Image (spheres, grey):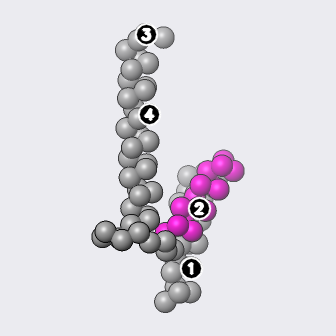
Amino acid sequence: MNHYWIAVIGTSAIAFALKYSGHAAQTFTSESKLMIDHRLLGLSVAIIALLLKAPFPVVVLSAALSSALLYNLNN
């Protein structure tokens, strides 16, 4: 493989990791406060579904449904 392709793939992986961690960081903060809420459950369910190699629509729906269920139970 050419050195340019290695650089492109490496840069893409870094950009993906930064963007992905940005979404996880928003799950744990609100304004300037650290908090844990229903979004943590959705994130956890999505990670478990991804580890189980579930199709993307299943990952999204399971995360959304679990998060919404916990949100509605608390309110």
- For the record, the magenta segment spans 39-53
Whether residue 51 is in magenta: the answer is yes
Upstream in sequence: badge 2 or badge 3? 3
Left or right, 72 with respect to 48, comes to left
Type of the residue with mark 3: Asn
Q: Which residue is mark 4?
A: 13
Could you tell me if the residues under marks 1 and 3 are in contact, i.e. CB atoms within 8 Å?
A: no
Give the distance between the C-alpha atoms of the residues marked 4 and 1, in whole angstroms.
33 Å
Give the distance between the C-alpha atoms of the residues marked 2 and 1, in whole angstroms.
14 Å
Q: Residue furthest top?
A: 2
Rendering coords of residue 63 (x, y %): 55, 65
Residue at the location (44% across, 64% down)?
A: 27
Give the distance between the C-alpha atoms of the residues marked 1 and 3, in whole angstroms.
49 Å
Per the rendering, the mark at residue 69 is: 1
Q: Which residue is mark 3?
A: 2
Q: Secondary structure at mark 4?
A: helix
Q: Residues within 10 Å of mark 4 (few under 14, many from 20)?
A: few
